[in-house]
Image (tube, rainbow, N blue to C red):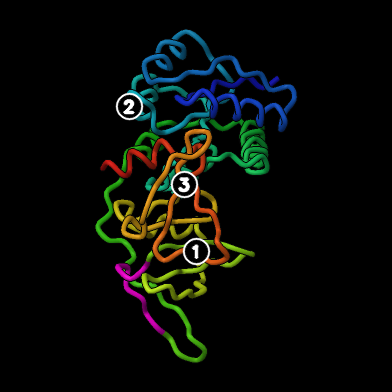
Amino acid sequence: MLTVAIIEDEPLAADDLEKTLNEVDVEAKVMAKLDSVSASIEWLSNNTVDLILSDIELGDGLSFDIFKQLPNSTPIILTTAYDQYAIRAFKENSIDYLLKPIDKQELEAAIKKFQNWQKSGNEFDVTNLLDALRPQSREKYQERFMVTLGEKIKSIPEEEVAYFFSEDRYTFLVTNDGHQHIINMNLGDLENTLDPKKFYRINRKFIISYHSIQNMVAYSKSRVKIDLIPPPPNAMDVVVSVERSGPFKKWLND
């Protein structure tokens, strides 16, 4: 039986993660759902589990504050709605990294990765993860995006980009004047190249720039509906996902 501790400060997200985990592994048992750095330190000081599923950003700090105070060899799978962290570093130094909303297949792959790691007999080293968890400053973000117009090639500067969206396995760049261009990058790759002060991934389909926001209104389940300039094609609804609504509001206030 796999024993797990979930560190997550949003109760609905913690419940959804537990439900998805039980769908992936019916024998998995969540021993605790911890909602803060302080609660996690207290519980982990007196209890052990096989695996920790931990959000990065908590109400009273970052999860690396937990592992810094309680260095241990318990394997960790990271979960977060924030896109400004170094995903590659996390994948190299934790068991895995999952972006919210948690996808069942991705969680299943992460659990299998953990099981393979467990069979190897290796010891988990939290030291490298602590370094990777610290928000990393970046000197330079992508400032131009190459697109093709028939046989012509054009470079679009960052300030002319209103938003990016994905549809039918393609990623589109939409300029401030409403032109659409297919680009050879997926949204996951784009997240790591864009300046997080200017761009935010609001759901699985859209990364928007701050200046593309025309209006915002409260939507169901604490979500936010956004009117973009220019409007997206086919009258697509642009709604911040439940998991990202809180972080999105913090982003607006940065």
Residue 176's place in the image compared with 141, above or below, is: below
The quadrant of the image that shows the N terminus is top right
Cα separation, mark 1 vs mark 3, equals 13 Å
Cα separation, mark 1 vs mark 2, equals 36 Å
- Residue under label 1, please give it: 232
Amino acid at circle 1: Pro
Percent of width and height locating residue 224: 45, 42
Q: Is residue 156 magenta?
A: yes
SS at mark 2 in the image? strand
- Residue under label 2, please give it: 61
Amino acid at circle 3: Lys
Q: Earlier in the sequence, mark 1 or mark 3?
A: 3
Mark 2 packing: few (<14 Cα in 10 Å), some, or many (20+)?
few
| Residue at (31% x, 44% y) in the render | 252
Residue 106's place in the image compared with 183, above or below, is: above
Residue 192's place in the image compared with 57, above or below, is: below
Cα separation, mark 3 vs mark 2, equals 28 Å
- Residue under label 3, please give it: 225
Magenta part of the chain? 154-161
| Residue 25, numbered circle | none
Q: Nearer the viewer, mark 1 or mark 2?
A: 1
